[in-house]
Image (cartoon, grey):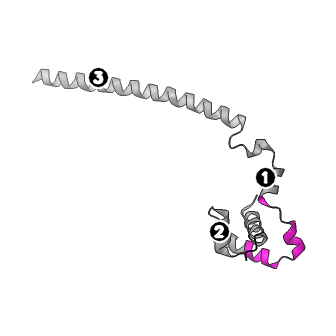
Amino acid sequence: MSPLDQVLCAAKQLSDEGKNPTLALIKTKLGMSIAMPTLIQGLQQYKSMNATDKAAIPTKAQLNASVPAAQLSPVNTEQQQKIEQLERELLVLKTDYQAVCQRLTALESALLNADEAKK
């Protein structure tokens, strides 16, 4: 759903609740940041619609019902597999990093000990 569609949907919901849609009410209803020009455009478009066009605007519940469950899922199977692969790679990198840090610390200690022995 485009930001403009979200504004129209919010304006319709407010109107259905018996409230006069305003920029402030729409912004509050959306609960997320949408650019002010989009909010203004959506409100102007909503106010210029006739009753039939306003009735044709789908509600959020109707839109969610028409979207397949797989699309509503925040992470699909392919994305989940990629996340798991990246987590495994990150674990290997962390282990390697710790090993390098330990070797560096050991080398620095050996160097300091060698410098002190020369004095």
Q: Identify which residue is drawn at 72% across, 34% down.
A: 77
Is label 2 or label 3 in front?
Answer: 2
In the picture shown, does residue 95 fall above or below 36? above
Point out residue 41 in the picture as x, y percentages from the top left corner: 73, 74
Point out residue 66 in the picture as x, y percentages from the top left corner: 84, 51
Q: Residue furthest left?
A: 119
Residue span colored magenta: 42-60
In the picture shown, does residue 46 fall above or below 118? below
Is label 1 or label 3 in front?
Answer: 1
Question: Closer to the camera, 25 or 79?
Answer: 25
Residue wearing tag 2:
27
Q: CA distance from mark 2 to mark 3?
A: 58 Å
Dividing the picture into quadrants, the one containing residue 14 is bottom right
Of the numbered discs in the image, which one, if any, rests on residue 64? 1
Q: Residue furthest bottom?
A: 48
Of the numbered discs in the image, which one, if any, rests on residue 106? 3
Amino acid of disc 3: Ala
Point out residue 88 in the picture as x, y percentages from the top left corner: 56, 28
Q: Identify which residue is drawn at 90% across, 72% down.
A: 52
Q: CA distance from mark 1 to mark 2?
A: 20 Å
Dividing the picture into quadrants, the one containing residue 61 is bottom right
